Image (tube, rainbow, N blue to C red):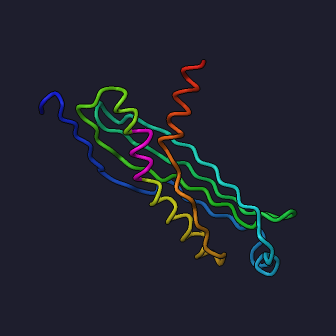
Amino acid sequence: MTENQIKFVVHRIYSKDISLESPEAPMIFNEIKMQPKVGFNLKTSINEIDKSTYEVTLDISVKAETEEKAIYLVELKQSGVFGIEGADEDLKSSFLNVRCPDIIFPYAMETVSTLIQKSGFPPIFFAPIDFNALHQQELAKKKNN
């Protein structure tokens, strides 16, 4: 491999952990005529498997609730195994914090949306996430500390 050649490989995308809770079912189906409040949380973690292979995991939590009751809570760890060779540390960091989550996110959102719908609730749609902007914010925070 020449010095400037970068090799990026998606080895596998998979669901590592999935959970759905709907503690008020089936009675909640009669009560959700109003728009519930939906909360969304996302964390990214990176695990180095070996010198050029990494597991990137999106840890996603989606919670819908009314003023008084939880409608559902979905938790998902969607992961991918990626190979990165020939990249310097900055470029590798960009791949791991931006490109890899960009690849995993649609799989995660499809899984969450399908799970919610198959549980008897209306489908939910998620706006795309700008992982590059999030990564730049993290870099700026580290620079200021």
Task: Relative to 47, say whether 29 is above or below.
Answer: below
Which residue is depicted at the point 40% across and 36% down? 94
Residue occupying the far left of the picture: 1
Which residue is depicted at the point 45% across and 37% down? 46
Q: Which residues are magenta?
A: 96-103
Give the position of the C terminus as an image quadrant: top right
How many circles with numbers are drawn on the protein?
Answer: 0
Task: Relative to 30, say whether 134 is above or below.
Answer: above
Residue occupying the far top of the picture: 145
Q: Is residue 2 left or right of 126 when viewed as pictured? A: left
Q: In the rendering, at what x and y percent does residue 99 appear?
A: 39, 45
In magenta stretch: residue 135:
no
Q: Nearer the viewer, residue 18 or 42?
A: 42
Q: In the rendering, at what x and y percent does residue 55 appear?
A: 39, 42
In magenta stretch: residue 98:
yes
Q: Is residue 15 left or right of 53 when viewed as pictured? A: right
Q: Nearer the viewer, residue 102 or 23?
A: 102
Which residue is depicted at the point 55% across and 59% down? 18
Quarter of the view holding residue 54: top left
Give the position of the N terminus as an image quadrant: top left
